[in-house]
């Protein structure tokens, strides 16, 4: 099983930043469970209600005092049958997004400990959400991931797992679009980047929006064995490949003498896997100085970069696929001719998370239309229909390909009403369609493209109109059950007496 590590931080720290009322990050800020649009007084950022982005759930508010608006309401998911509960957002195909999920339990269900559950993005399990320790310390938790939208929607889901003993919940979701140049050294067609740490060294406060227009949170980091220095001039970072805020270069940690600088960062232990590591450096001195600040960078004893010449213009050094395990020690070793100690301003570490694939887009669009045709589709009919496989839609079976196809719909006796959308004809890998014993009305759509269909069970519904002649073109069809409907006209002559075909 793929294991992820997250270092959830104090959510109150980022809200020390301020923006004017007309400034908003480019994307969606969603207050889950809220009925009205709310502006966070401390930041000026406005969050909208989550109605329309998700269904099949309950809202509640918390009685605790002095909570930020986005922590004072939540949405929870009590249904134990649904395989997942999803938020779906419109997206631009190919665009990068930063997704942040925020959780604050608040004892909404009368319990003492928050539930443990999974979160899913697209068709990939993202992480286990376990906020128990944070909640016990009076804190909220957040998780971040950077990914590309591979279709025109982006889904963020939560799901029960074997550890879940009460209703999963969520407090807020933030979906921020990123510039095309950002994090482009990673193959985001095959991976997503899970935030492990993003720090500003020597800073007192968190850097966030509007200083960082992409609403990334740069947490302060200090080391008691180092000195803090501040830059004496401004810097422009628009040409940096991933657009770090200028404030991330305002402070740094260094040594008072020209000796090696060792920093254990991030503070926690990391699982043994691959990471994207970016480190930021800038000389804090006046640009007219004649001495160079040159040093080499080692990470856990391995050379990360040799003889880096750091100037007042600033520089980024990164590795898109670097192995880390356990403690992480960053060592900055000054050049033998350098008379100035090394320093470091900021850093980012992301875990590379292999994407689990996705259902064929043609089938996804067909299933979404099918869901819209029903008045009451199953509660988990959102997000990716097939993936993760243990969280596929109720009644949906899929092929074992890397890009799965829908091969069977078993929706007998689920109390469905509405119509059978014509897009069922686009499920060209479908072998079995069972919708018997529901209350579906309207006509039976043409199915000439569903040429793999073997069994069609539409009995005991309210279908009207003729039996489609296109059924006769389906050479593998061996069962058609249409009894107890309100159909008109005869059975098409091409179907009558067809060898190996059972018709009711």
Image: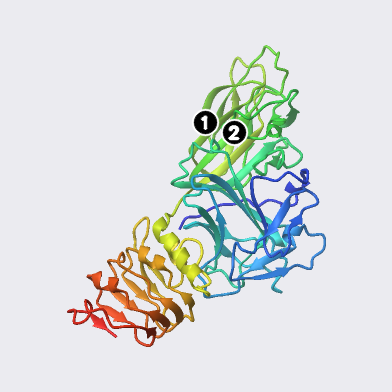
Which residue reaches farthest left? Answer: 499
Q: Please state the horizontal and vertical placement of residue 222, each as a whole percent of the image.
A: 71, 38
For mark 1, give the secondary structure. strand
Quarter of the image with the C terminus is bottom left
**Quadrant of residue 475 in the image?**
bottom left
Q: Is residue 406 visible?
A: no
Residue depicted at x 41% and y 58%: 359
Q: In the orientation shown, which residue stands out farthest toward the top?
A: 290
CA gap, disc 2 and disc 1? 10 Å
The crowd level at tag 1 (other Cα within 10 Å; few <14, some 14-19, many 20+) is some
Question: Between residues 429 and 212, which one lies in front from this camera angle?
Answer: 429
Instruction: Give the x, y percent position of residue 56.
Output: 58, 71
- Residue 190: image x %, image y %? 43, 46
Q: Can see residue 420? A: yes
Query: On screen, 267 above or below 260?
Result: below
| Residue sticking out furthest to the right | 65
User: Residues at badges 2 and 1 in contact (C-beta under 8 Å)?
Assistant: yes
Q: Which mark is residue 259?
A: none
The answer to which image quadrant residue 288 occupies is top right
Q: Return the residue nearer the eye: 470 or 106.
A: 470
Instruction: Please name the residue shown 37% across and 59% down the image.
Output: 404
Residue 423 in the image: x percent, y percent? 40, 65
What residue does disc 2 label?
Answer: 279
Left or right: 67 as drawn, with respect to 292 = right
Query: Which residue is disc 1 drawn over?
Result: 304
């Amino acid at each position: 099983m793929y294991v992820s590590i997250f270092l959830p931080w104090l959510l109150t720290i980022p809200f020390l930043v301020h923006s004017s009322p007309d400034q908003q990050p480019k994307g969606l800020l969603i207050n889950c469970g809220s009925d009205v649009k709310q502006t966070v007084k401390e930041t000026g950022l406005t969050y909208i209600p989550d109605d329309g982005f998700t269904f099949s759930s309950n809202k509640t508010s918390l009685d605790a005092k002095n909570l930020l608006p986005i922590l004072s309401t939540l949405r929870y998911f009590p249904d134990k049958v649904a395989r997942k509960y999803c938020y779906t957002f419109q997206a631009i195909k190919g665009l990068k997004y930063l997704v942040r999920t925020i959780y604050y339990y608040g004892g909404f269900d009368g319990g003492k400990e928050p539930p443990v559950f999974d979160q899913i993005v697209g068709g990939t399990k993202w992480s286990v959400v376990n906020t128990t320790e944070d909640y016990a310390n009076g804190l909220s938790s957040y998780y971040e991931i950077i990914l590309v939208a591979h279709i025109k929607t982006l889904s963020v889901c939560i799901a029960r797992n074997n550890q879940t003993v009460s209703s999963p919940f969520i407090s807020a979701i933030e979906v921020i679009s990123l510039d095309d140049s950002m994090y482009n050294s990673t193959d985001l067609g095959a991976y997503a980047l899970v935030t492990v740490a993003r720090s500003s060294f020597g800073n007192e406060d968190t850097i966030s929006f509007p200083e960082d227009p992409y609403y990334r949170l740069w947490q302060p980091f200090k080391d008691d064995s180092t000195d803090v220095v501040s830059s004496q001039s401004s810097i422009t970072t628009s040409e940096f490949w991933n657009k770090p805020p200028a404030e991330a270069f305002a402070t740094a940690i260094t040594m008072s003498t020209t000796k090696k600088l060792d920093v254990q960062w991030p503070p926690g232990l990391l699982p043994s896997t691959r990471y994207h590591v970016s480190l930021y450096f800038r000389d804090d001195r006046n640009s007219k100085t004649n001495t160079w600040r040159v040093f080499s960078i080692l990470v856990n004893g391995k050379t990360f970069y040799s003889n880096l010449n750091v100037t007042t213009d600033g520089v980024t050094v990164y590795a898109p696929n670097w192995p880390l395990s356990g403690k992480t020690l960053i060592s900055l070793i000054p050049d033998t001719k350098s008379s100035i100690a090394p320093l470091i301003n900021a850093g980012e570490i992301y875990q590379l998370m292999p994407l689990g694939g996705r259902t064929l887009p043609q089938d996804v669009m067909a299933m979404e239309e099918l869901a819209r045709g029903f008045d009451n589709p199953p509660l988990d009919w959102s997000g990716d229909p097939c993936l993760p496989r243990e969280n596929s839609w109720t009644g949906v079976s899929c092929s074992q390909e890397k890009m799965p196809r829908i091969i069977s719909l078993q929706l007998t006796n689920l109390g469905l009403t509405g119509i059978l959308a014509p897009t069922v004809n686009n499920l060209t890998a479908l072998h079995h369609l069972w919708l018997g014993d529901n209350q579906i009305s309207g006509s039976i759509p043409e199915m000439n493209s569903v040429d793999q269909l073997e069994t069609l069970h539409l009995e005991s519904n309210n279908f009207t109109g003729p039996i489609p002649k296109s059924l006769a073109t389906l050479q593998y069809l061996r069962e058609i059950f249409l009894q107890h409907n309100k159909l008109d006209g005869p059975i098409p002559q091409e179907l009558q007496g067809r060898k190996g075909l059972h018709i009711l």
